[in-house]
Amino acid sequence: MTENLIMNEIEPEIRKTWIPQFESNPNPTKDKLYVNVAFPYPSGAMHVGHGRTYIIPDVVARFWRMRGKQVLFPMAFHVTGAPVLGIAKRIAKKDEKTLKLYGGLYRVPQDTLEKFTDPVTIVNYFADEYQRVMQQLGLSIDWRRRFTTIIPQYSKFIEWQYTHVYGQGKVQKGEYPVRYCPNCDQPVGDHDLLEGDTAEIMHYVFVMFRFGEFEIPCATLRPETIFGVTNLWANPETEHLKAEVDGKKWIISKDAALKLRMQKHEVKELGTIAGTELIDKKAVCTYTGKEVTILPASFVDPDMGSGLVMSVPAHAPFDYIALRDLQQQGKYTDITPITLVTVPGYKSTPAAEIVEKNRIPNQDDPRMDALTQELYTLEFSKGKLNDNCGKHAGKSVRQAREDVTKEFTEEKGSIIFHEMSQKRVICRCGNRVYVKILDDQWFINYGDAAWKQQVHEVMPNVELVPPEVSAEFDRTIDWLREWPCSRRVGLGTHVPWDPKWLFEPLSDSTIYMAYYTISHKIVKIPPEKLTPAVFDYIFLGKGNPKELPVDEATVNDLRSEFLYWYPYDYRFSAKDLISNHLTFQMFHHRAIFPDELQPKGMVVFGMGLLNGMKMSSSKGNVFLLEDAANEFGADTVRMFLVGSAEPWQDFDWRNELVLSVKKQIERMWQLVLDAESASGTTPIDAWLVSRMQQRIAGATTALTKFQTRQALQEAYNGVVSDLAWYRRRLADGAPGAVLKDVMSQWVRLMAPVIPYTAEALWKKTGHDGLISFADWPVADESKINPQIELSEGLLQRTVEDIQSILKLVQIEAKRVRMFVAPEWKHQVFSIVASAEDKRNVVKTVMADEALHARGKEAADAAVQTVRLVHSLPPQIVSAVAEGIDETAIFTAAKAFLEKECGLEVEVCAAEGSDHPKARSALPFKPAIVVE
RNA sequence: GCGAGGGUAGCCAAGCCAGGCCAACGGCGCCAGACUUAAGAUCUGGUCUUCAGUAGUUCAUGGGUUCGAAUCCCACCCCUCGCACCA
């Protein structure tokens, strides 16, 4: 409790000392380490889930700083994009939900909230809040380098980046189908949808049938089934359009006309034609030349494809049933299904078989969709075209579909027609979403095979933590295709060669890690002087520094600062960014920077839960980081977030668990201060020191591998349990002066995780300077003492054994006798320990003449020893095998043992004793008799 | 559906890649004892079943390989993340 008050008082003071110290400049005498995090989009308050993302890199930064590296840990704010525009609009409209979120959960003061009708005000407000909370948490950030992505200097940087990427032909105008809301006049993303977020854009082929002077396009996903067409379907209720589409005369539905226009086709309406006028007329397939009849069908939906469909009754269950129904009425009985695909499990006409097998009564049966899907999938994966398919006979469905599509589109005037897989896809504005082809949109071509290949080649050189994410990166690199990188609205940088567009937010944040290296200096240069040539020199060393708009000394200074820090060593981010940002930045680094400046490492985090549930601001299930820091103290928050799981694992914030972390810190505080009075020496000092070396080594190794949880296990739990044993072993409880050294090491081991506490303790225990810059402890191998660790280990185990016996024993104990194993059993132990094959070790033991002479006794001992050896750690086994004087150890610790069990303890040799238990004595496992 | 990762005792979680050091590190919670006027803190012990320090059954589920599997192989179920005009 009292510590809490102390921490609240001292935190601000320590913070004040820190901030200027963490401003990091190039230092040629030191190795550098540059870590950075995916910067936040400050549109709301930080919650504990965000906390870990920034705290882990800070722990890493602090660790390496203490190990002597010149560390750079910068931070900036990503304010590009559209979300805040929406927020500002909603606040202006006094939207209740938004006001409640910002005024309530985020606790924005009323007068500030009123100014939130301006988007920039929002991001600036929260950027400041982020910085404040990050400072409160003690993040060792160089705040001079802070920037936002809409300052003019940064925009100049982005312009420079894209002159290169564009110059390499990697940014192209593309035609690409997108979900689009005609009402908002904008593409819609997943989170812009009110309904239908599972719908996909389907790509149909229009196959053409000649109908007098017109053509009838039929939309299909299976163009190869053209060989099985028996008829067309038209809905007699529908009024169709006669239209000129891209100069050709087509018959289509009105809906199709609308869609075609959105898909960049020119549609001129010539007139209408009733559905009934089509029925029973003939149309000729432009591909096969086959003449087919147009039959009536009520299921044909004008709002689907062209509004007219072709019928393949042998393979399409719907077509089969529709035809069956007509034929049962005695109509069109001359039509027979034409099978064109053979597929395992079906004989002649798969659609007929599957429908009849499932006894489908009519088209409205709810099972129809599933059956259709089943058959389509089977045919696609296993089907082969038969002899009805002309030159495509024998091909797989997969192959034939590709080939036929190509022929259609290249030779037969077919088009690809895009349609949502569901009709109810609704924009947030309430209107229906269509597929639109944006023809004036800029794309970054991540689909470029050569570029992908180059990125693949870089990846093996990038250290990935944890290594398992490598597969996901590889998949992402392969999977990425054209990425639309421009948009009409939002904050950000204009596309230099087409200024009516802005760069989209994921595209203007791919190489800003390089910008950090100079951000604090470049901000002093007027933006108009920051031509691409200036950046070319700073980042690529190209051109003549004397001929630039910025003076030579300045650009050289920037150049050398960049070269000092770059490439960055580690980038930290949550795992959800692998599929976009983290992979994008690899592409851009590869496109812009030379081999030696490619990223060196990435650390990918797991996600955060709050009390077992997903954190979500909109659902109110969040715990603000600032509240956590105020309630528990910065160190507690840090230690919990870093220690509850390894960085790449998901973690769960639970207040009751956090509280116990707080107690642990308080306990350490007390232990360290208590040690101040230690003096003199004790026989156990060497043991404690020896153990400490291993804790240091363990924590160091763990932190090197970003295993913050493991590091804490060593640095906190390990040390605490060692200290407990140490104190327990001391006869009078007075520790030796060596404890002060141990504590000094301990505090330093913990400093990266709980820097405030460590800083305060460092000062209180009489050290000068900041612990943040103190030397990280180094394990001294010469202080590792296997003998004393072995003897303490023996005592620990023996005490445990005695106590478990005392618990079980029924009699009222008076004394404990311990029988130490005889010398010949040590021989057995050594033989067993060195045997490679423990299965036949009894034979080996019995091969010894002296042991053989002992007969069954020796054989039994050998069997028991094998079991014992299996249960001991290897270093103990080898130490015991080398020799151990158990009698001496127990005799020396007699007082301790008696204190522990509260009984008289007698140590005697098993050899010669007539007590039956004595025979079970083994090396490192004395026989214990309670009597 | 597809891609990636994961399921270990009341909870969190180590171990798995390189099979025997595994009843399975550690922490939390819980129980008991010590200390204390008491509470808290601290210390000690316990926490699958059984037991003179042992043994038995466990590591999502079902098979398999092996003298031996939490660890390797196959199948199946469940969870998390991603699946793109977006932070």
Image (cartoon, rainbow, N blue to C red):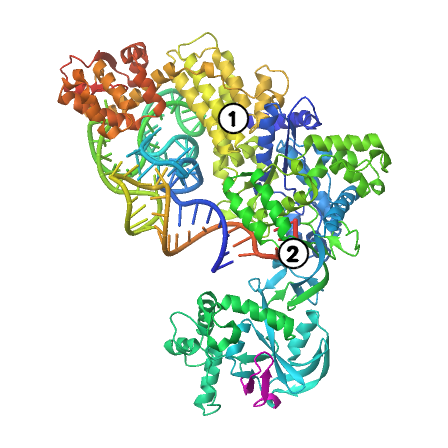
Magenta-span inclusion, residue A396: no
Query: Is there any visible trace of residue A47 in the rendered image?
Result: no
Magenta-span inclusion, residue A282: yes
Marks 1 and 2: which is nearer the front? 2
- Looking at the picture, does residue A882 appear above or below residue A522? above
Q: Position of residue A324 (x, y in %)?
A: 45, 85
**Residue drawn at (39%, 79%) of the image:** A356
Q: Position of residue A12 (x, y in %)?
A: 65, 28
* Amino acid marked by disc 1: Thr
User: Which one is nearer the viewer's eye here, B38 or A565?
Assistant: A565
- Looking at the picture, does residue A674 appear above or below residue A501? above
- Looking at the picture, does residue A293 appear above or below residue A828? below
Label 2 secondary element: strand
Q: Position of residue A593 (x, y in %)?
A: 69, 40
Report the chain holding disc 1.
A
Q: What's the CA distance linking mark 1 and mark 2?
A: 44 Å
Q: Is residue A468 left or right of residue A30?
A: left
Query: Is there any visible trace of residue A596 in the rendered image?
Result: yes
User: Which one is nearer the viewer's eye here, B70 or A18?
Assistant: B70
Q: Is residue A102 left or right of residue A609?
A: right
- Looking at the picture, does residue A409 appear above or below residue A489? below
Q: Position of residue A427 (x, y in %)?
A: 64, 64
* Amino acid marked by disc 2: Glu
User: Which one is nearer the viewer's eye here, A605 or A508?
Assistant: A508
Discs 1, 2: same chain: yes
Instruction: Residue at the far top: name it.
Output: A680
Task: Identify the magenta region.
Answer: A277-297
The image's mark for residue A700 is 1
**Residue drawn at (59%, 27%) of the image:** A64
Task: Identify the residue position indicated by label 2 in the image.
Answer: A482
